[in-house]
Image (spheres, rainbow, N blue to C red):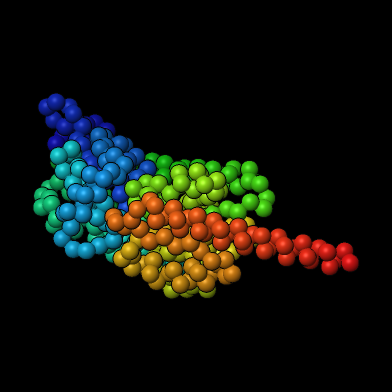
């Protein structure tokens, strides 16, 4: 494939841009802005899969060659949808992620790190169609250019200068997206009525935002009149996590920082979304409960067999728990005021 005067890859003959498929699963729920902007800047036509549907779930479950957590099965379903929709598939090996403390390892779980190997084996994808760089996001934009240059097929590879410029633009777009989330969270918190319980929903981005994985629980919380906020909308980088010096997981560190923030606010409560067979969460849930102190959390483990009715029962039961805690706290505060007046 030739390269135009700017160094960007173009399709010969028809002039059509090369197509790259990106599955809307696992890491794309947090880093999709970076991926899409990057390939658009490089001159690709990006094909992003549609939101998870029952068909995607079924095709993913049927394609598995080993038992994994539900999000990885869904990832397989999204990859399968792209096989006849794009010339190239972007399936990176994500190793780590940025964090507020450079000493933290910030690693992704091994199933996310190795997801492209599983999909490649399951579907027999030809190596020539894959764009699968090893990406150390903890290094920032500076660490991505060389990995992408090595991973892009020669027929669609632009110059190093073009790749580095595209990475810079994409990283800034991702940073703007993150700042917009935090700003939206601040606006939401500023409008809240004091004393009303707030459920802070923690979890990995794919569980928080893929409505098939979370059974549309955000909509159900709204119908129940419960104020809730995903942890992605909270600024937690300033929360000290030095009492967990060997925290291995990047998202695990973010979840524990959020738990500490929940504990600081009397009206905040923790609801954690996770999956059966999630090894990383099985390690941190004990610490999550401990950090919330005297506030019992609601922990929902979901997979392809989970149903809305069961989840709603849990939500309603937890609402009663929260209301009882709030009532006891207000009653205790009233008694203290009476004793002070006496």
Q: Nearer the viewer, residue 341 or 78?
A: 341
Q: Nearer the viewer, residue 292 or 172?
A: 292
Q: Quadrant of the N terminus?
A: top left
Q: Is residue 143 visible?
A: no
The image shows residue 155 at horizontal and vertical percentages of 15, 41
What is the quadrant of residue 331 in the picture?
A: bottom right
The image shows residue 258 at horizontal and vertical percentages of 52, 60
The image shows residue 262 at horizontal and vertical percentages of 57, 60
Relative vertical location of residue 134 with respect to residue 342 in this rendering, above or below = above
Relative vertical location of residue 329 with respect to residue 30 in this rendering, above or below = below
Residue located at (56% from left, 48% from top): 227
Q: Is 159 placed left or right of 164 in the picture?
A: left
Residue located at (31% from left, 61% from top): 95
Q: Is 120 placed left or right of 166 in the picture?
A: left
Q: Quadrant of the C terminus?
A: bottom right
Q: Residue furthest right?
A: 342
Relative vertical location of residue 43 with respect to residue 281 in this rendering, above or below = above
Q: Is residue 85 visible?
A: yes
Q: How many marks?
A: 0
Residue located at (45% from left, 58% from top): 314
The image shows residue 199 at horizontal and vertical percentages of 54, 54
Residue located at (18% from left, 38% from top): 85
Q: Is 319 placed left or right of 248 in the picture?
A: right
What is the quadrant of residue 252 in the picture?
A: bottom left
């Amino acid at each position: 494939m030739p390269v135009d005067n700017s160094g960007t890859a173009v399709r010969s003959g028809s002039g059509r841009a090369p197509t790259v498929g990106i599955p809307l699963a696992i890491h794309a729920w947090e880093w999709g802005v970076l991926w899409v902007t990057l390939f658009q800047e490089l001159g690709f036509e990006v094909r992003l899969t549609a939101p998870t549907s029952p068909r995607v779930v079924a095709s993913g479950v049927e394609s598995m060659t080993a038992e994994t957590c539900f999000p990885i099965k869904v990832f397989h379903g999204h990859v399968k949808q792209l096989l006849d929709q794009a010339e190239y598939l972007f399936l990176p090996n994500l190793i780590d992620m940025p964090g507020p403390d450079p000493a933290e390892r910030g690693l992704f779980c091994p199933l996310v790190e190795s997801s492209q190997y599983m999909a490649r084996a399951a579907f027999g994808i030809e190596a020539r169609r894959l764009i699968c760089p090893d990406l150390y996001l903890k290094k920032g934009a500076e660490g991505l250019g060389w990995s992408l240059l090595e991973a892009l097929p020669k027929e669609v590879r632009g110059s190093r200068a073009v790749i580095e410029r595209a990475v810079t633009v994409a990283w800034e777009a991702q940073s703007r997206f993150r700042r917009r989330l935090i700003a939206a969270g601040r606006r939401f918190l500023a409008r809240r009525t004091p004393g009303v319980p707030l459920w802070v929903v923690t979890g990995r981005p794919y569980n928080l935002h893929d409505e098939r994985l979370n059974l549309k629980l955000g909509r159900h919380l709204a119908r129940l009149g419960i104020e809730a906020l995903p942890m992605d909308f909270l600024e937690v980088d300033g929360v000290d996590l030095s009492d967990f010096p060997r925290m291995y997981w990047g998202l695990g560190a973010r979840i524990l920082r959020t738990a500490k923030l929940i504990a600081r606010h009397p009206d905040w409560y923790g609801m954690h979304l996770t999956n059966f067979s999630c090894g990383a969460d099985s390690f941190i849930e004990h610490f999550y409960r401990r950090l919330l102190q005297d506030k019992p959390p609601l922990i929902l483990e979901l997979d392809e067999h989970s149903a809305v009715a069961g989840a709603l029962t849990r939500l309603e039961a937890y609402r009663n728990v929260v209301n009882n805690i709030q009532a006891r706290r207000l009653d205790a505060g009233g008694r203290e005021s009476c004793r002070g007046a006496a």
